[in-house]
C-alpha cells in the first residue's frame, strides 16, 4: 500500500486549505482512512478519520472547521480545513488502517501546513 498526499503550504489565519491523499496497491474500501498531525514538540495526534461508508470522527479542536471525506471511486481521502488557526500549524500525515486487520497500518509522507497569524 502506498499513500500519496498533496496539498498544504502557507495560509493566513481564517483561510482554508484542502489536503488529498490517494491510496494505491490495495482495495481502498478495505481501509479506514485518517489524517494525523504533529506540531513541533508535540506528539502526533489523530485529527479525523472516516470509514468505508463515510462515518467520520474528529478531534474536538477541529470539529466544525474541518471535514474529512472520501471518494471510493478515486481511492482518495480529503481533509477540507476551514477557519484555520495558528495552532493548526503542523505536519499532516495521511493514514490507512485495514478494517479487517488493524495491525496493517500505513502512513503517507507528511505535508506541512503553516497558518500565519
Image (cartoon, rainbow, N blue to C red):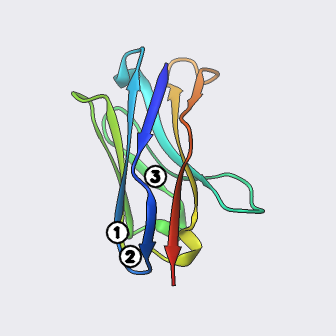
Read off the residue under disc 2. Answer: 83
Q: Position of residue 62 (x, y in %)?
A: 48, 67
- Please say if 96 is above or below 88: above
- Residue in the image at 51% along x and 85% along y: 117
Q: Secondary structure at mark 3?
A: strand
Query: Which residue appears farthest toward the left when viewing the image?
Result: 73
Q: Position of residue 73 (x, y in %)?
A: 21, 27
Q: Residue 22's image quarter?
A: top left
Density class for disc 1 (Cα within 10 Å; few <14, some 14-19, many ≥20) is some
Read off the residue under disc 1. Answer: 16
Query: Which residue appears farthest toward the front when viewing the image?
Result: 10
- Residue in the image at 41% along x and 14% along y: 26
Q: Are marks 2 and 1 in contact (CB under 8 Å)?
A: yes
- Residue in the image at 32% along x and 41% along y: 54
* Inter-mark Cα distance, 2 to 1: 6 Å
Q: In the rendering, which numbered label is found on residue 57?
A: 3
* Disc number lying in front (2 or 3): 2
- Please say if 114 is above or below 28: below
Q: Position of residue 97 (x, y in %)?
A: 53, 29
Tell me which label, 3 or 1, sits earlier in the chain.
1
Residue 100 shown left or right of residue 69 in the figure = right
Amino acid at each position: 500500500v502506498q499513500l500519496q498526499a498533496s496539498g498544504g503550504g502557507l495560509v493566513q489565519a481564517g483561510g482554508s486549505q484542502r489536503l488529498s491523499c490517494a491510496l494505491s496497491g490495495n482495495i481502498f474500501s478495505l481501509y479506514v482512512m485518517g489524517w494525523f498531525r504533529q506540531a513541533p514538540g508535540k506528539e502526533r495526534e489523530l485529527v479525523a478519520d472516516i470509514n468505508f461508508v463515510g462515518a467520520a470522527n474528529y478531534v474536538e479542536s477541529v470539529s466544525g472547521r474541518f471535514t474529512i471525506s472520501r471518494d471510493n471511486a478515486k481511492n482518495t481521502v480529503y481533509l477540507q480545513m476551514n477557519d484555520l488557526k495558528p495552532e493548526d500549524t503542523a505536519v499532516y500525515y495521511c493514514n490507512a488502517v485495514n478494517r479487517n486487520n488493524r495491525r496493517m497500518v500505513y502512513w503517507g509522507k507528511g505535508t506541512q501546513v503553516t497558518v500565519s497569524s
